[in-house]
Image (cartoon, rainbow, N blue to C red):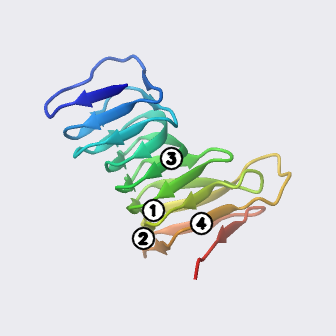
Amino acid sequence: KTLTLHAGSTISGQGLWQLESADLVLGSDLPTAFPLSLDGGCRVFGPGRLVLHDAQSIAGEFRTPVELAAGATISLFNSTYHSGLVIQPGATATLPRFHTVTLNGASTNRGTLRLGSRNDGGQLNGSGRLENEGLVDIFVTDPVSSGSEATFNLPVRVATTGRLLVEDRKSTRLNSSH
């Protein structure tokens, strides 16, 4: 199943667009002014950017740049970003319990990136890197029943404008392959 959106085409309406194990081909930038749900079997590719707004959940393989716009509240389920993920100021991305995000392209957080710790082990993996110019928030997922940390398996650079917040009862692990 393939949905191809050529340059100049639009999608409109207030209903939920749900793609399950489908390919979405973007001929140009697609600003989502509608609810979009992508499951883990989805693939998004093409020369356009996928720009997400509002509250949405996404998973799958992204071979096109993905941008979370100001005001977006996005749940990032198991997903891979080959062309980068950008979290703009005012946007929030959360890795739900037991999920992994793979960044194989340079990615930037200017908003808020949340990873659970102590009971779910949210992970950031990949051959890319994360430039943190915003807030990375390591939060406790209750009930605290294990020692599974939030884990970073890729290079992370915290800019002078960035913060890495690890509060009481939280832990994080930065792994190195060197």
Kindly indicate the quadrant of the structure image that contains residue 160: bottom left
- SS under mark 4: strand
Residue 135's x, y, as percent? 51, 61
Near-viewer residue (5 or 137)? 5
Taking the spot 50% from the left edge, 33% from the top edge, the residue there is 39
Badge 1 is on which residue?
A: 134
> Which x, y percent locates residue 156?
50, 71
Q: Amino acid at mark 4?
A: Phe
Q: CA distance from mark 1 to mark 4?
A: 16 Å
Q: Is residue 149 left or right of residue 157?
A: right
- Name the amino acid, label 1: Gly
The reply to whether the C-beta atoms of the residues labelled 1 and 4 are less than 8 Å apart is no
Q: Quadrant of residue 151?
A: bottom right
Left/right placement of residue 109 relative to residue 119 reads left
Image depth: mark 3 or mark 2 in front:
3
Q: Which residue is mark 3?
A: 79
Q: Residues within 10 Å of mark 4 (few under 14, many from 20)?
A: many
Check if mark 2's residue and mark 1's residue have beta carbons within 8 Å.
yes
Residue 152 - label: 4
173 up-or-down from 107: above or below: below
The Cα–Cα distance between marks 2 and 1, rounded to whole angstroms, is 7 Å
Q: Which residue is mark 2?
A: 161
Other residues around mark 2 within 10 Å, as few (<14) / some (14–19) / many (≥20): few
* Residue 171, x across and y down, in percent: 72, 65
